[in-house]
Amino acid sequence: MVIGVDIGNTTIEIGFIENLNSIKSFKLATDLKRTRDDWLLTISSLLRMENIFKNDVRHILISSVVPQIENKIADVFKEIFEKKVLFLGKEVEIPIKNKYKRPEEVGVDRLLNAYSAIRKIKPPIVVVDLGTAITFDVINDKGEYEGGLIFPGMESSIECLFSKTAKLPKINMYEPDYIVGKTTEESINAGIYWGYASLIDGVIDRIEGFYKTAFKVVITGGASEFISKGLREGYILNRKLTMEGFYYISKTL
């Protein structure tokens, strides 16, 4: 088994990966105030619940964009499994050519998703990851990482709207069966949902126009399933793209 730990700004996803057809993952809140002992208790409980023991695990891989917490998490896994924990982008390079002007600026999570995508799909590909931020990552027809775009995520936009406007309520998002809202809450919901769906479709159009070629589009991340029904047909929804990436990386070790 491979344990993949994806430390993001909002959640930490811990995946237990036997193979591409057997992936189980759990999400925890990225709480910077939690102590190492807090994490030890939580992660130990999760492992007991899933009946995962020391000898079951071959590799422990971490992808992190939150330096403040990553060492606490790594130390917990080292203590539990008495095994080296490998950070992607540090101890383990992701085998994809990075054409960013300053390659070190690209989040390792974005490169991991790009590498995972090209292991499954013939490029060119655009990976759209809907998390705290929404990222578009472009892989050219040679399988090289070209770069991408970054937008505030859906929840970030809702928080900003709520905090910056005196009379607009904070809402819980749902898939609307309408375009034009008849209440303030419906109007905000429709604006966020259809606005982001149109953003994704529109950016894909612009990417394809710039490169003068059609791209396969993979949608992933926490909000991917929610927004997918509002997008044009033909996109590939893959909630497990990151965890599959950990599996592919483990095969190179």
Image (cartoon, rainbow, N blue to C red):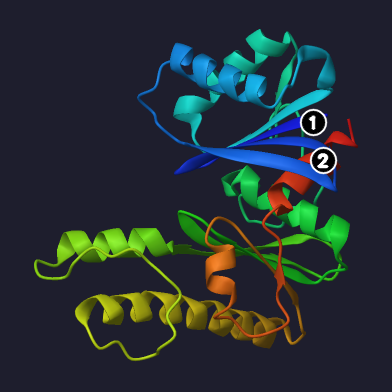
Q: CA distance from mark 2 to mark 1?
A: 7 Å
Badge 2 marks a residue whose secondary structure is helix
Badge 1 marks a residue whose secondary structure is strand
Residue 153 % position (x, y): 43, 61
Look at the picture and state if 120 lies above or below 212: above
Q: Quadrant of the C terminus?
A: top right
Q: Is residue 3 visible?
A: yes
Residue 73 % position (x, y): 56, 22
Q: Which residue is mark 1?
A: 2
Q: Nearer the viewer, residue 200 or 13?
A: 13
Q: Nearer the viewer, residue 19 or 156?
A: 19
Q: Residue at x 46, y 11 (%)?
A: 37
> Which residue occupies the extreme bottom position in the image?
180
Residue 102 % position (x, y): 61, 50
Instruction: Please state which amino acid type lies under the numbered disc 1.
Output: Val
Q: Which residue is mark 2?
A: 247
